[in-house]
Amino acid sequence: MSDPLNVGEGEREIVRIFALDLPRDQAKAIANQQKSNGAPPPLAQMLGLDQLDFDHVEVFQARDLTGVGLSGYIIEGLGVDAETVGDDATALDAETGSVVVLHAAAFLGRAVTLEPAAPLRFLGRYTLAEAERTKLAPPSPRSPVSETRDPTPETVLRPPARGPRTLVLIALLAAALLVLAAAFLFGGPG
């Protein structure tokens, strides 16, 4: 495996996780601070970069992931291949402070070498599960892949939302229970 801090040109389907060893308020302020007076944003500077696409950067508190943990969040929430997390899961779940998730698109398609400086601490580089399946399965001859079509970062980096499907199932279950309750209360032998 190559150096996990080297970002390839046009890289996709990779997330890098860093701890941001600062109090919550300071971490939030750094995450929201954009260029000022021509200087790169503080988070970009901490990575040794001059710019980042903040639409593909997440900063949050690992302790807020109660019951899921950081490893669960990146596997279930981001769609990271569980095998790439492997033995790192315990260390990831031990994090309780501020965490920075950098999606590949945050680097604007450029080849860069990250040079994290304190208070950033590198935790790992992980591949999205969909990327692994795509590498293993060639395109079907019935549905040719256009070489000019470039998937949007949102399509590549975000797993499909499951929220609406869950809400519909809950609503159907509630409706079924109401029908059964009504039948029991009003449909008994007279």
Image (spheres, rainbow, N blue to C red):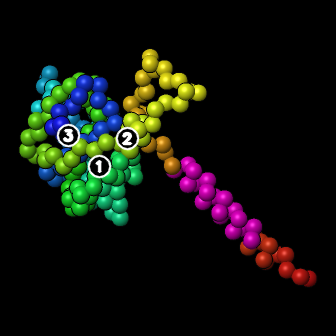
Which of disc 2 and disc 3 is earlier in sequence? Answer: 3
Which corner quadrant of the image does residue 37 belong to? Answer: top left
The image shows residue 65, relative to residue 33, as above or below, that is below
Q: Point out which mark residue 1 bears.
A: 3
Which of disc 1 and disc 2 is earlier in sequence? Answer: 1
Q: Nearer the viewer, residue 10 or 182?
A: 10
Q: Is residue 190 magenta?
A: no
- List x then y, in percent, for residue 146: 48, 20
* The C terminus, quarter of image: bottom right
Residue appearing at x 85%, y 75% in the figure: 187
Q: Residues within 10 Å of mark 2 (few under 14, many from 20)?
A: few
* The N terminus, quarter of image: top left
Q: Point out which mark residue 132 bears.
A: 2
The number of discs equals 3
Instruction: Look at the image and tell me whether residue 101 can be seen.
Output: no
- List x then y, in percent, for residue 138: 46, 32
Residue appearing at x 85%, y 80% in the figure: 188
Answer yes or no: do the residues labelled 1 and 3 have beta carbons within 8 Å? no
- List x then y, in percent, for residue 59: 26, 45
Residue lying at the far left in this picture: please name it.
Answer: 118
Q: Helix, strand, or loop for circle 2?
A: helix
Q: Helix, strand, or loop for circle 1?
A: helix
Residue appearing at x 18%, y 49% in the figure: 123
Residue appearing at x 59%, y 27% in the figure: 142
Residue 169 located left or right of residue 68: right
Question: Which SS type dominates the magenta stretch?
Answer: helix
Q: Residues within 10 Å of mark 3 (few under 14, many from 20)?
A: few
Amino acid of disc 2: Glu
Q: Give the magenta-colored segment's residue range.
A: 163-180
The residue indicated by pointer 1 is 84
Q: Nearer the viewer, residue 182 or 108?
A: 108
Amino acid of disc 3: Met
